[in-house]
Amino acid sequence: MSTTSVTWWGHSTVWLEDSGVTLLTDPVLTDRLAHLRRMAGPTPRLAGPPDAVLLSHLHADHFHVASLKAVPGRPLLVVPRGAAAFVAKALGPEVAERCVELAPGDDTTISGVRVRAVPARHDGGRGPWSRERAVAVGFMVEGAARTWFAGDTGLFDEMHDFGPLDLALIPVGGWGPTLGSHGHLDAADGAEALRRVKASWSVPVHYGTLWPIGFGRVRRHMFDEPGARFAEHAARTSPDTRVRVLTHGETLTVEPAA
């Protein structure tokens, strides 16, 4: 039976292998990002050039230009509809030619693995200082397993339509001592998302990695605890799901349901 493996490198950076295809999500490969620094885990060490990079939205902690420049090889960039223009400006026309733009409902196939964009409830702009915009999406990866990479999102009703899944990669925190409810999930809401999508396995992401410089002791529970709190909530709301809280650089291998 084919297996699927996922390695978490912190924040929303995941190395996903399915059916011989390697996918890298929202890469942050540096130890510094503007006013944020990596406070846990090693600098990511990629196993080699990925076949494709999945980019969920334009926010700099997900669509990090310096990290994209550091990704080896010439992978496809699967981006939200409208993002290729920003790629051309930030990374050059050669990289933009490797972009595949997807709106929710659109899909592409990479060596037999289907990647489908799904909705996300999150602002799609680059930031308040920028006019660059593209819709925020999540991704459904369908190979040997059905894996949902949520990107960044709040709760929405259509999550009920995603399952059943083999693996759900769910954001459960953030990168600072505050986390707004609009367009984000905390540990409890992440567990509710998991209940809606009915996954066999789940890994919490988007926490415990980046923190503002000078704020190392401010609300550290919001940095350290979201993964464990997510697992506790999920044990009550989705008792049939196996939750694995990975450390940075750790790999989980799952066998898809028959």
Image: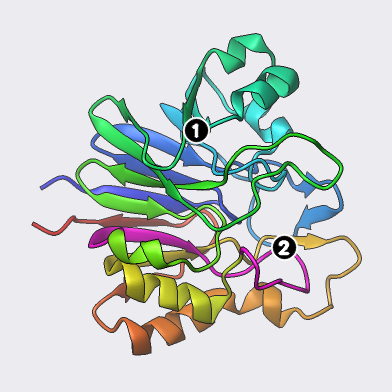
Residue toward you, 99 or 240:
99
Using the image, determine if residue 215 lies above or below residue 49: below
Using the image, determine if residue 138 lies above or below residue 58: below
Q: Give coordinates of residue 93: x percent, y percent.
A: 65, 10
What kind of element bears circle 1?
strand
Occupied quadrant, residue 10 = bottom right
Report the residue marked by disc 1: 53
Using the image, determine if residue 35 lies above or below residue 95: below
Q: In this view, does 204 lie to the left or right of 35?
A: left
Crowd class of label 1 (few under 14; some 14 to 19; many from 20; radius 10 Å): many
Q: Give coordinates of residue 193: x percent, y percent.
A: 42, 71
Q: Which of marks 2 and 1 is nearer the N terminus?
A: 1
Task: Give me the residue at 52% from left, 52% from top.
Answer: 151
Q: Give coordinates of residue 89: x percent, y percent.
A: 74, 19
Task: Give me the residue at 19% from left, 56% from top.
Answer: 255
Amino acid carrying mark 1 in the image: Val
Report the residue marked by disc 2: 175
Amino acid carrying mark 2 in the image: Trp
Magenta-colored stretch includes residue 148: no
3D distance between C-alphas at marks 2 and 1: 22 Å
- Which label number is shown at residue 199? none
Q: Give coordinates of residue 120: x percent, y percent.
A: 50, 54
What kind of element bears circle 2?
loop
